[in-house]
Amino acid sequence: TQQTVAFIGLGNMGGPMAANLVKAGFVVTGFDPVPAAAESAVSNGIAVASSAAEAAKGADVVVTMLPSGHHLLEVYGSGVLDAVAPGALLIDSSTIAVQDSRTAAELATAAGARFIDAPVSGGVGGAAAGTLTFMVGGSDEDVATAAPVLEPMAGRVVHCGGVGAGQAAKICNNMILGITMVGVSEAFVLGERLGLTHQALFDVASTASGQCWALTTNCPVPGPVPTSPANREYAPGFASPLMAKDLTLAMKAADDTLTDARMGQLAANIFRDFARHKGRGLDFSAVIELVREEPLEPTTGI
Ligand code: NAD
């Protein structure tokens, strides 16, 4: 018999992800407290329930796509865990703290259910196209059970380890990304002030040891990479507040594990500052504008 899927959180990501499950033939019942999200889900063939627990009633699989770990634990505590079919598989695709993911797994196990963390990268475009990369943490058996459900939403599924490993991989990757984007931005601004053209710096660095995704795919200046957000006034892409969120989660994890991540901390501070002000609706590569604005005070030199 066809598995029934409950989908909790039908926002920018969850909406199109749930729609892809419907297209693949799953019977999907969803819940989102925001009326616009619920209405759009209905138009995509999702049956919308009046609460998360109602959506989860008798479900074999529950996918959550929520803003934070706090939301996830609240949803699990709202009757969802009692409502699901015995032995149901809970898949959380939200980006949340590793520790919250492990707490969610404990709650699920105590209720006789199973849990994997499966955060994604690929953004709203990847969610709509069904080409997200899932970074998955959980047992081999649970990840195998999840595979046919993830497939219609995924380009790639990487099994990273036990519960929490998906979240860990996601924040470690995005810490590299945040740091390198600031580095690339600083290099372009320094180059500008030394009379170097963007194209010349790109031609050298993109084929030399400065090569990285922040440079060659998401280049923060217009021109060298015509598809990068810099060419469309930094329309996201990957919005600055999401980068700030992921770096905040990474720094919480660094704190918890006594990891000296000074570059990550600096990037977290820079993106939090940027996201709160100018960067709010912009791609994270627009951080180059913040770098350009730094006061031009001569240093004394060492
Ligand atoms: P969003 O705010 O558009 O969607 C979240 C949805 O959850 C909202 O519609 C909200 O109403 C709903 N919600 C809140 N409380 C709820 C509850 N108790 N029950 C049911 N629904 C509830 O956010 P999004 O962009 O879809 O992101 C979701 C998650 O995916 C976040 O953790 C985010 O960090 C992560 N993520 C986002 C992107 C992206 O590009 N947008 C990329 C990768 C990962």
Image: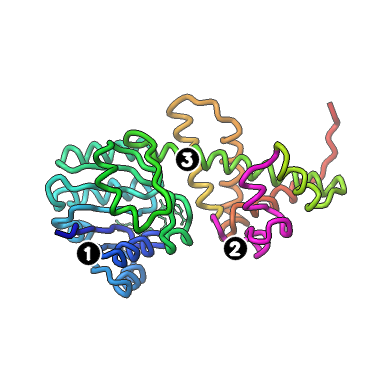
Residue closest to the far bottom? 43
Drawn side of residue 121 relative to residue 18, left or right? right
Question: At 35% across and 53% down in the image, what residue appears?
Answer: 66
Is residue 247 in the magenta section? no
Drawn side of residue 207 relative to residue 251, left or right? right
> Which numbered dot is residue 27?
1
> Which numbered dot is residue 44?
none
Helix, strand or loop status at disc 1: strand
Confirm if mark 1 falls within 8 A of ligand 1: no
Residue closest to the far right? 195
Residue ID for mark 3 = 171
Drawn side of residue 24 relative to residue 239, left or right? left
Question: At 44% across and 26% down in the image, what residue appears?
Answer: 257
**Viewer-side residue, 224 vs 46:** 224
> Which numbered dot is residue 235?
2
Residue type for callout 3? Ile
Tell which tag, 2 or 1, sits nearer the viewer: 1
Q: Quadrant of residue 47?
A: bottom left
**In the figure, 27 relative to 151: above or below?**
below
Question: At 21% across and 66% down in the image, what residue appears?
Answer: 49
**Viewer-side residue, 114 vs 286:** 114
Q: Main secondary structure of the magenta part?
A: loop
